[in-house]
Amino acid sequence: MALPVRDAVCFLGQVVTRFRSTGALIPSSPRLARAMVGSIRDLAPGEVVVELGPGTGALTRELAQRFPRNPIVAIEFNTIFADRLRARLPEVHVVEGCASRLPDHLAALGITTDRVGAVVSGLPLLSLPREIIGDIFAAIAASLAPGRRYVQFTYSKRAWRRINPPGFRLDRTERVWLNLPPAQVLPFTRLAA
């Protein structure tokens, strides 16, 4: 499925005005979305999938298609992206807010840690201030039970060597060449405390 032109135009507008928080020049490709969703593993019906930084919704659409029996909660900081997601994917719980407040967002929806099956992220973590990165990792760790997945993508696996999310083990990664630029899918498993 090709990237809708309206999504590309909307994304480009946000890149121009908010590059640091957008973190890319174009939205993620459908191939990258499929690779990320494929890294989640199977979920029990009713387990919640949390997406951080859904942007124009390429990954969100893939999640909804792959996990139709699982609630999806998308946390988006950008008002324009959040409004577009609500209009296009009414079955997804879109929360406008910061990923560093993930436990609060889930609590407001009545979702407990044991119900969260996976967290996936399109956040441009390498471009964010270090203290925000630490807060986001702490929020993800607080929201996932041991053995559950956190899946992130990056354009620079080498830069991720300096970022080691505490409480997580990096599993086998996957390179997605058919994305611009090529991306690396980083699946992590939450470790026991």
Image (cartoon, rainbow, N blue to C red):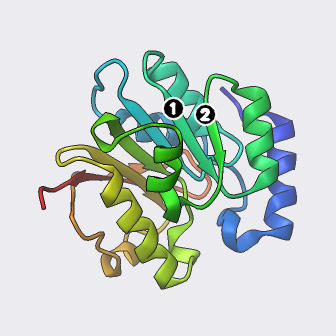
Residue located at (29% from left, 45% from top): 149
**Which quadrant of the figure has residue 74?**
top right
Q: Disc 1 on helix, strand or loop?
A: strand
Of callouts 2 and 1, the N-terminal one: 1
> What residue type is disc 2 on?
His
Do labels 2 and 1 touch, CB within 8 Å?
yes
- Residue 154: x %, y % from top left: 47, 62
Q: Amino acid at mark 1?
A: Ile
The residue lying at 61 percent from left, 29 percent from top is 92
* Element class at badge 2: strand
Residue 43, relative to residue 109: is it above or below?
above
Q: Residue 16 or 111: which is nearer the viewer?
A: 111
Would you say residue 18 is visible in this rendering?
yes
Instruction: Classify residue 112 by image quadrant.
Output: top left
Could you tell me residue 189's position as x and y percent? Answer: 22, 51
Could you tell me residue 168's position as x and y percent? 22, 61
State the residue lying farthest toward the left: 192
Using the image, determine if residue 153 lies above or below residue 138: above
Residue that label 1 marks: 72
Q: Is residue 77 left or right of residue 192?
A: right
Find disc 2 in the rendering and name its residue: 93
Disc 2 crowd, CA 10 A, few/some/many (<14, 14-19, 20+): some
In percent of width and height, residue 39 lies at 33, 39
